[in-house]
Image: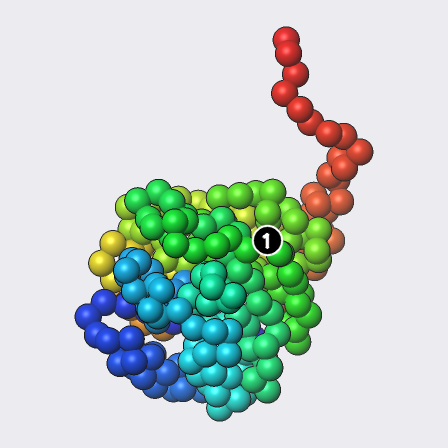
Amino acid sequence: MRVAMVQVDSSGESVPERRARVGELVRGLGGADLVVLPELWAVGYFAFDAYAEGAEPFEGPSVSDARSWARELGAWVHLGSFVEMDAGRLFNTAVLLSPEGEVAHVYRKIHVFGYRSREAELLTPGDELPVADTSFGRVAATTCYDLRFPELWRGLVDGGAQIAIVPAAWPAARREHWRLFTSCRAVEEQVLLIGCNAAGAELGGHSRVVDPWGAVLAEAGTEAGVTWCDVDPAVVERARAEFPVLADRRTDLTFQGADV
Ligand SMILES: O=C(O)CCC(=O)C(=O)O
């Protein structure tokens, strides 16, 4: 299975120009089975003042463009995420489209980010952790900051997730955390993790694919562009069978801080 991660730089053009530029790039990715884009690339993660104006209903340009890319390529397309407007509230919504252009998976970012970011002030957190069955396995998504919350990831695995798609706008200042957490979650949860980060000013790039053994199958640099990776999704079940750490969990115990 061929994965193409599109590391987008969202600086220096209007949103329609950016959509057109990225669309042309994606439509040129013939041969990909799965295309993945970063978090909030259309409006630009740091364009907080533009979130409200750039917000879309679910069936807005982000989903509509990704539907047509998926159909044209005959590939799965994870559009990254966009600012979704629903009943007067804004969400950071990530969507996977099937090769037929059908919506296969929707995830609203649960841990909205408030450290030197206005995301937590402007966006409403999601509260659902769905998984979806695809031709390449059971898929879940979490967005950027969610990487720091292992209990959320354990919830995904409890839901049967084998592949985790992580759109991100992770800053360059904490790039080593990005590398650490993407590797850590892949190993800890025994998933194939496909993390697509944004590039450009302040953003860290280094989109990467990590398998359940911790092998880094591909890693981008800091520049905008496409990183290809050949993956065998069956590695997940092989790793779980060979090294059954998830089966060794002590789900009969509840741990609380003890007074000593
Ligand atoms: O956790 C971090 O350091 C970065 C998180 C972030 O930038 C985000 O969630 O958008």
Total marks drawn? 1
Say which residue appears at 48% left-offset and 87% top-offset: 68
In the image, residue 216 sits, relative to residue 62, either above or below, namely: above
Does residue 213 appear in the picture of this structure? no
Residue 57 left/right relative to 51: right
In-image side of 83 versus 241 (left or right): left
List x then y, in percent, for residue 222: 28, 60
Between 129 and 26, the residue placed more toward the observer is 129
Quadrant for the N terminus in the image: bottom right
| x 41%, y 58%: residue | 168
Residue receiving disc 1: 127
Residue 112 seen: yes
| Residue reaching furthest to the left | 12
Residue flagged by tag 1: what amino acid is it? Asp
Residue drawn at point x = 69 percent, y = 27 percent: 255
Give the secondary structure at mark 1: loop
Label 1 beta carbon less than 8 Å to ligand 1: no
Q: x%, y% of residue 210?
A: 50, 57
Q: Going 32% across and 84% down the picture, which residue do you hit?
A: 20
